[in-house]
Image: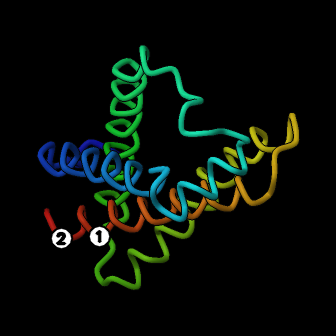
């Protein structure tokens, strides 16, 4: 089934970097989304543990690599011909794995819906960018 599927590793690496950059913008305390996210988490700019930032960014980059690679596999397998087909793929991946998969994290213990919505929109933006990248760079 997956025997003939190959992914462009350069695109996967670029996709991982794109996810990191969008995260740095989206969650930056100086942006409106970053301020709202910190407020929803009851955090301040000084709340983070700066000693562990390197490990946290490394862990997030590895997670971004996995997301990019698996997304590249889906794009190669489905092989969407047009952007609208890619958009449909994005919606199903986003709803089926990212939104549904993270719902429990926001439900137990209950967290504000605003936080769930902000994180889900961030994931949707990344998924759109990844699918567009992999469709464009075959």
Front residue of 25/109: it is 25
Residue at screen point 43% across, 24% down: 56
Front residue of 80/32: it is 32
Task: Please tell me whether mark 1 sits on a helix, a strand or a loop.
Answer: helix
Left or right of 11: which side holds 58?
Answer: right
Dot 2 crowding, Cα within 10 Å, few <14, some 14–19, many 20+: few
Is 28 drawn above or below residue 57 in the view shown?
A: below
Callout 1–callout 2 Cβ contact below 8 Å: yes
Which label belongs to residue 132?
1
Residue at screen point 47% across, 67% down: 90
Q: Kindly indicate the quadrant of the structure image that contains residue 16.
A: top left
Image coordinates for residue 27, horizontal then vertical, percent? 49, 50
Residue at screen point 54% across, 70% down: 91
Front residue of 76/13: it is 13
Task: Please tell me whether mark 2 sits on a helix, a strand or a loop.
Answer: helix
- Please state, as top left, top right, bottom left or bottom right, where the C terminus lies in the image: bottom left
Left or right of 119: which side holds 136?
Answer: left
Dot 1 crowding, Cα within 10 Å, few <14, some 14–19, many 20+: some
Is 70 drawn above or below residue 62 in the view shown?
A: below
Left or right of 98: which side holds 126?
Answer: left
Which label belongs to residue 73?
none
Q: Tell me the distance, in whole angstroms, between the alpha carbons under discs 1 and 2.
A: 6 Å
Residue at screen point 31% across, 43% down: 69
Question: Which colour style is shown?
Answer: rainbow
Image coordinates for residue 66, horizontal then vertical, percent? 37, 36
Image coordinates for residue 50, horizontal then vertical, percent? 44, 21
Give the total of numbered labels: 2
* Residue corresponding to mark 2: 136
Image coordinates for residue 51, horizontal then vertical, percent? 42, 14
């Amino acid at each position: 089934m997956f025997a003939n599927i190959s992914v462009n590793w350069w695109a996967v690496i670029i996709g991982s970097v794109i996810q990191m950059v969008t995260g740095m913008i989206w969650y930056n305390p100086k942006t409106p989304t970053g301020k709202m996210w910190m407020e929803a988490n009851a955090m301040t700019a000084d709340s983070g543990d700066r000693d562990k930032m390197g490990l946290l960014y490394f862990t997030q980059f590895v997670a971004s690599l996995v997301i990019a690679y698996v997304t590249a596999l889906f794009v190669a397998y489905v092989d969407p011909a047009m952007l609208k087909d890619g958009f449909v793929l994005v919606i199903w991946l986003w709803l089926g794995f990212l939104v549904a998969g993270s719902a429990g994290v926001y439900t137990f213990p209950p967290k504000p819906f605003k936080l769930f919505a902000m994180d889900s929109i961030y994931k949707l933006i990344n998924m759109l960018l990844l699918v567009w990248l992999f469709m464009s760079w075959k």
